[in-house]
Image: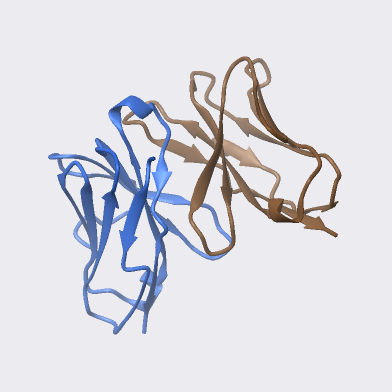
């Protein structure tokens, strides 16, 4: 149980394009989903928290107009990196929790974004 | 002081040995504690939650010390496959968010 999928696993795009990443909870209803970014050899950095049907809460320093998050259903959240630039290249990972799980988060396999 | 701190390592340990590492946290009101394992270029995977009374899962034992505000992870009879980065996580007050340590890298040598 508690399986989270993420798509695509890898994406390479040109500077200025937008990239959409999907995060799905496959066997549970994710009341809360989290989006993280991780640079090489660094820890997870929380970007935003989203509750189904509500606007995402962004961490300080994360531009909400650049990283658009939609959590329209209990099993799907999307992150769109708009007008991507090389400095946005990173490993983006989503996680999800269900109401009964307490604080336990289950992670998707991550998306490796490379912006040329 | 960081909210959650870990020794980055690496810990180089011979196969079969016992290894332990700690994670300190600053918020005395924290209630939920976790150890995750992350392999290179992969996502974190839940290893175990940490309960007040301590808990054990096979070769892994987790302990919580509220007075000194740290959690620990003990790995017995270490295997080559235990090589990974071990992340600790502590809940933040709001919205079920977790605060993450930077991870401790463990290398098990044959």
Q: Where is residue A63 in the image (x, y as percent from the top left)?
A: 26, 57
The hue of chain A in the figure is: blue
Identify which residue, B90 or B36, lies in the foreground.
Answer: B36
The hue of chain B in the figure is: brown
Q: In this view, does B103 lie to the left or right of B78?
A: left
Q: Position of residue B50 (x, y in %)?
A: 58, 26
* Colouring scheme applied when the structure was drawn: by chain
Q: Position of residue A76 (x, y in %)?
A: 21, 50
**Which image quarter holds the N terminus of chain B?**
top right
Q: Position of residue B68 (x, y in %)?
A: 68, 20
Identify which residue, A81 or A60, lies in the foreground.
Answer: A81
Residue B1 visible in image: no
**Vertical placement of B57 versus A83: above or below?**
above
Residue name at image x 40 percent, y 72 percent:
A89
Residue B68 visible in image: yes
Residue name at image x 30 percent, y 42 percent:
A27
Residue name at image x 39 percent, y 53 percent:
A108
Identify which residue, A38 or A52, lies in the foreground.
Answer: A52
Q: In this view, does B62 lie to the left or right of A78?
A: right
Q: In this view, does A29 lie to the left or right of B37?
A: left
Residue B77 figure quarter? top right
Residue B109 figure quarter? bottom right
């Amino acid at each position: 149980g508690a399986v989270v999928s993420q798509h695509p696993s890898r994406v390479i795009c040109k500077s200025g394009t937008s990239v959409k990443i999907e995060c799905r909870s496959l066997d549970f209803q994710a009341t809360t989903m989290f989006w993280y970014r991780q640079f090489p050899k660094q820890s997870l950095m929380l970007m935003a928290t989203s509750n189904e049907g509500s606007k995402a809460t962004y961490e300080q320093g994360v531009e909400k107009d650049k990283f658009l998050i939609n959590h329209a259903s209990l099993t799907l959240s999307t992150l769109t990196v708009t007008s991507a630039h090389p400095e946005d290249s990173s490993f983006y990972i989503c996680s999800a929790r269900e109401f009964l799980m307490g604080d336990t988060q289950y992670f998707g396999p991550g998306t490796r974004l490379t912006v040329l | 002081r960081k909210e959650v701190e870990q020794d980055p390592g690496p810990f180089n340990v011979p196969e079969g040995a016992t290894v332990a590492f700690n994670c300190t946290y600053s918020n005395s009101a924290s209630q939920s504690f976790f150890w995750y394992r992350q392999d290179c270029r992969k996502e974190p995977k839940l290893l175990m939650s940490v309960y007040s009374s301590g808990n054990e899962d096979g070769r892994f034992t987790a302990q919580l010390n509220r007075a000194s505000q740290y959690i620990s992870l003990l790995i017995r009879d270490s295997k080559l496959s235990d090589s990974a980065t071990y992340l600790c996580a502590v809940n933040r007050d709001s919205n079920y968010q977790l605060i993450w340590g930077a991870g401790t890298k463990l290398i098990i040598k044959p």
